[in-house]
Image: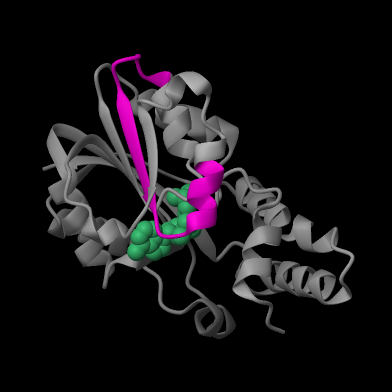
Amino acid sequence: MTLSPDVRMRLSHRHLRYNCPLGDEEAHALCAALAGEGLRLLDLGCGTGRLVTTLLRRCDARSTARGVDIEPSFIAAALGARRADETERLVFEVGDATAVTETADRVLCVGAHHAWPSPAACLSALAARLRPGGRLLFGAAFWQSPPSAEALALLGPQRDRDGWARDLADAGLAPLRVSHASEETFDDFEARWCRGFAESDDAAHRAFGASREETYRRVYRGQLGFLWVIAKRA
Ligand SMILES: C[S@@+](CC[C@H](N)C(=O)[O-])C[C@H]1O[C@@H](n2cnc3c(N)ncnc32)[C@H](O)[C@@H]1O
């Protein structure tokens, strides 16, 4: 069953806070590890901007942030969620993250490595965006256990944890903190993703959401994970 990209995006985002499996506790820990004073933040593939906004609010008033995403409706949502006192120092723009050339003290790239031709190309581009002493926050899906043939066919090739470790090292990045989404957080993400479909008046939308939920539980739950890495230039 296929739905138009617009409908899919609108309904899947109705209850999502982040467009990735991220719970409040982990978001708090990541932001605590990255916050600072006088920092420039750059979020490439920022979606609706929630994570970079949360991080900026943990930094001092001299810190500034820019989020870039290719999807105009996400940028509109990010702009709409800014507080009046943030308009000068929290900027969101529609654009291609792969074309961004500025450098920053904190570079975020979460669930967006597909924008680059390969994971290796993404990580070396991100490393090049880091200012001296800077930190990268990278989030990406990974196989946390060997995938079944059905999961592989559905989701395509993904790195495992060691694969990401090799790519990070090849890009000259040294991990400082590595974690992954708990099963509870992944369940919550999938449930939120599907909830907007379940609430629709349209039977086709409800069927789509139910099918995704069933596929998650049956095919990739526990196999696909989500990795969080804070890294510095080695
Ligand atoms: C899985 S979502 C993650 C969004 C956000 N980082 C978050 O965690 O909520 C991936 C994002 O990458 C964006 N994206 C894909 N290709 C892009 C590109 N070439 N330039 C900028 N953003 C891109 C998508 O529009 C989407 O918002």
The answer, for residue 12, to whether it is visible in the render is: yes
Q: Considering only vertical position in the picture, is 180 above or below 58? A: below
Q: How is the image coloured?
A: one colour
Identify which residue, 157 or 77, lies in the foreground.
77
Q: Quadrant of residue 99?
A: bottom left
**Magenta-colored stretch includes residue 72:** yes
The number of discs equals 0
x and y, in percent, of residue 22 in the image: 54, 43
Which residue is at a point 47% across and 72% down the rendered structure image? 146
Report the side of 66 relative to 78 (left or right). left
Q: Considering only vertical position in the picture, is 198 above or below 23? A: below
Identify which residue, 65 or 211, lies in the foreground.
65
Identify which residue, 94 or 161, lies in the foreground.
94
x and y, in percent, of residue 133 in the image: 14, 30
Which residue is at a point 48% across and 56% down the rendered structure image? 72
Q: Quadrant of the C terminus?
A: top left
Q: Considering only vertical position in the picture, is 57 above or below 206? A: above
Which residue is at a point 13% across and 42% down the rendered structure image? 233
Which residue range is magenta in the image?
58-78
Report the side of 66 relative to 211 (left or right). left
Report the side of 131 relative to 42 (left or right). left
Q: Quadrant of residue 201?
A: bottom right
**Magenta-colored stretch includes residue 61:** yes
Q: Quadrant of the N terminus?
A: bottom right
x and y, in percent, of residue 193 in the image: 68, 57
Which residue is at a point 68% across and 82% down the rendered structure image? 2
User: Which image quarter has ligand 1?
Assistant: bottom left
The answer, for residue 173, to whether it is visible in the render is: no
Report the side of 94 relative to 22 (left or right). left
x and y, in percent, of residue 12 in the image: 67, 59
Q: Considering only vertical position in the picture, is 24 above or below 77? A: above
